[in-house]
Image: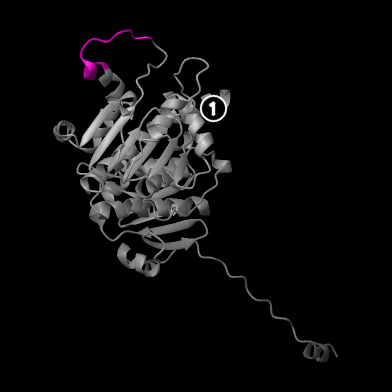
Amino acid sequence: MTNELNKAVPKKSIPKKSIPKKSIPKKSIQKKSIQKSRAKKKSSNLPNVKNKPTEIILDFADNSLLPALYGEHNIHLARLEKKLSAELIPKGNYIYVKGAAGACEAASIILGQIYSRLENGQSITMDDVDGFIRMVDIFDAPPKVKNLKAQMPEGLSSSAIRTRKTIIQPRSVNQGKYMDALRHENMIFGLGPAGTGKTFLAVAMAVSFLLEGKVDRIILSRPAVEAGEKLGFLPGDMKEKVDPYLRPLYDALNHMMSEEQAEKRIESGDIEVAPLAFMRGRTLSNAFVILDEAQNTTAMQMKMFLTRFGENCHMVVCGDPSQVDLPSGAISGLNNAANILKDIEEIAFVEFDADDVVRHQLVGKIVRAYDLQN
């Protein structure tokens, strides 16, 4: 009887649970060049990637680029490990990335971007590595609250600024937006703390425009205002009196071209460095015009400057609204203009914060501390 019941009631078969393998067999690792990988996945700049729940294997075709990719004594990999809380293990042409899924994917994106730069003949520094980390929006974020965005912002590579001396890439998301605005808009306000690259990038774009023949000249200006000090009368002629105030603009200019080239351009009139007071009554046409330290302009000075705008003029206004050196009670022309002009579509406003500081990590921490205090 029991045997008959057993025949009548078929036993349910229980499927075996699939157990993921802990290792990837060597046969599954295919050595493919990064170009072939891009052809299959156009939206990605990653090298050949093998995914596992907590492990990614990156395959780099050209091992001659790996020393620069890793950095001296693997310092670049160590930086990524520290910032992303992931483990990076180089073996031959492969890098094994282990850790949380988001951290692994972010590391693979960054390493892919660095490798692409090296393929194009560019050098990589630690500042560049930090810049790539900022691009995935996780720089200095605590490990437990990291909002890992494993997607490099699209189109930022097209924002690169080329001069005769260097190629400049954005090192934060807001820098990428700023560089896009500098390239495509005619009037731009760059607002934010010190060390975010507002003036440096504007001067770089101005030099690029001049070399490409898009403008006939560059005009660099800033108000001659002391940083809370009374220096009294300065010796020398007019140039010698105002040059100390304009020194930061000369420094930025010398990053883009040799000092000899800059001097020749200044002598020929292709580049003009002048205090804001010299702008009155002029029409600035076919020029790339930059006003630095704009927070130290008065409302009337700012209006005077903005209304110099002429045909084929590209005008950039840079400043830090939190560092105003005007006499007590005076209204900053930068803050005033930002409030009045914010609804004009043809004017681009790009705001930076402490996360965009590229001068030094300590500067970013100082800015955050002051922001919290205020």
Q: Quadrant of residue 1?
A: bottom right
Name the quarter where the C terminus is drawn.
top right
User: Where residue 109 appears, x then y in whole percent?
Assistant: 41, 54
Residue placed most toward the observer, 213 or 103: 213
Residue in view at x 55 percent, y 44 percent: 146
Within-10-Å neighbours for mark 1: few <14, some 14–19, many 20+: few
**Which stretch is magenta?**
230-241
Residue placed most toward the observer, 95 or 153: 153
Residue placed most toward the observer, 175 or 187: 187
Q: Quadrant of residue 92?
A: bottom left
Residue placed most toward the observer, 78 or 352: 352
How was this image coloured?
A: one colour
Q: Is residue 17 magenta?
A: no
Residue with the most extreme front position: 281
* Amino acid type, label 1: Asp
Residue 38, compared with residue 292, is above or below; it is below
Can I make out residue 52 in this image?
A: yes
User: Where residue 179 appears, x then y in whole percent?
Assistant: 37, 45
Residue to which mark 1 is pinned:
371
User: Where residue 186 appears, x then y in whole percent?
Assistant: 37, 45
User: Where residue 23 appears, x then y in whole percent?
Assistant: 46, 62
Can I make out residue 32 in this image?
A: no
Residue 139, compared with residue 113, is above or below; it is above
Residue in view at x 45 percent, y 30 percent: 193
Q: Is residue 236 magenta?
A: yes
Residue in view at x 24 percent, y 32 percent: 272
Residue 288, compared with residue 362, is above or below; it is below
